[in-house]
Image (cartoon, rainbow, N blue to C red):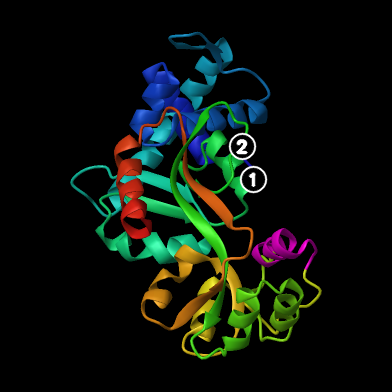
Amino acid sequence: MVNFEWFRTFKAIYETGSLTGAAEVLFISQPGVSLHLSSLESYVGYKLFDRSSRKMVSTERGKVLYNYIQEAVCKLEDAERHFHKSTEKDVPTISIGMCFETFQFTLEPYLPTLPFNLIIKFGEYPQMLSDLDSGILDMIITPQKGDYKGLEYKPFFKEKIVIVAGAKTETKEFNSLKKIKDKTGILNWLKTQTWYGTTGDMEHLRRFWHINFGKRPDFKPNYIVPNMSSILRCLSGGNGLAVIPDFLSKKELDAGNIKVLWEGDNLIENTLYFGTRKKSIYTEQIELIENIFIKEMI
């Protein structure tokens, strides 16, 4: 089914003569404009513009389509403006991809203060990178870098993957084993403890085990909860272990509700990046988001 936004984008390109001009008029990214146009051309089955370095020149079929839909699109836009709550000026909307916990521990409290609209998307990092490149997302927070030529990455933080323990977890025996570097004893002690994990991602636990013990964990967590926030609430002031990034547990650590049990003999660090397109019309909004993350995490 054809998307109305494809027609709106087509009309904006026709009237401004460029992808950049259409992006500015519609308050969306230029890759987003390109994606709408290619989708519409695939739908109708023919080219609508001849592309040059400076201008988008309408084909004859494009002129026919414009004359056919121009009045209808204008009427729909008028209806949208008439029935939408009025504002003094157009407010841009940007889309950002990150993991749920990163959003909850950093950006969520700031949402009511932002001077622009924001759409948050959660998902797997490879898909986020693809969505950023195609214009669906305007920015991502990621520990992974892709091979997309149109993207750039700015490192801003290093997270450590550590074992944390609830404040009431008895750790004297573990500390003694760690002091004498009894790797077998450490492994056996850890396997006897109460463990928490998350529903969707056990990668941190598997990676920590492989780096420090040379194998996959041969046990399953006692409790599988929805996300790392749930883990922290369960551990807070209680008993049990979990492998999580240290920055996510900063507030609980500062409050003394949990403690870092072990960073491992081989420290695991992930560099977090601000991922953006090299050319964006939302540089001001992106800079504001970056400053929030730097303030909260560094």
Q: Is residue 147 above or below residue 174?
A: above
Which quadrant would residue 19 be assigned to in this image?
A: top left
Residue placed at 55% from the left, 57% from the top? Answer: 122
Magenta stretch in the rendered image: 203-216
In the picture of the structure, the residue carrying the numbered disc 2 is 146
Q: Is residue 78 above or below residue 182?
A: above
Q: Residues within 10 Å of mark 1 (few under 14, many from 20)?
A: few
Q: Residue 26, position in %: x, y? A: 37, 34
Q: Secondary structure at mark 1?
A: helix
Q: Residue 208, position in %: x, y? A: 67, 63
* Discs 1, 2 touching: Cβ within 8 Å: yes
- Label 1 – label 2 distance at C-alpha: 8 Å
Q: Amino acid at mark 2?
A: Gly
Q: Amino acid at mark 1?
A: Pro
> Which quarter of the figure is the N terminus placed in?
top right
> Which quarter of the figure is the C terminus placed in?
bottom left
Q: Earlier in the sequence, mark 1 or mark 2?
A: 1
Tell me, yes or no, if residue 255 can be seen here: yes
Residue placed at 29% from the left, 38% from the top? Answer: 284
Q: Residue 78, position in %: x, y? A: 33, 41
Q: Residues within 10 Å of mark 2 (few under 14, many from 20)?
A: some
Q: Is 219 displayed left or right of 130 in the figure?
A: right
Residue placed at 40% from the left, 29% from the top? Answer: 23
In the picture of the structure, the residue carrying the numbered disc 1 is 126
Q: In front here: 266 or 282?
A: 266
Q: Is 124 displayed left or right of 281 in the figure?
A: right
Q: In front here: 51 or 167?
A: 167
Q: Residue furthest left?
A: 88
Q: Secondary structure at mark 2?
A: loop
Q: Residue 62, position in %: x, y? A: 54, 17
Q: Is 100 displayed left or right of 79 in the figure?
A: right
Tell me, yes or no, if residue 79 can be seen here: no
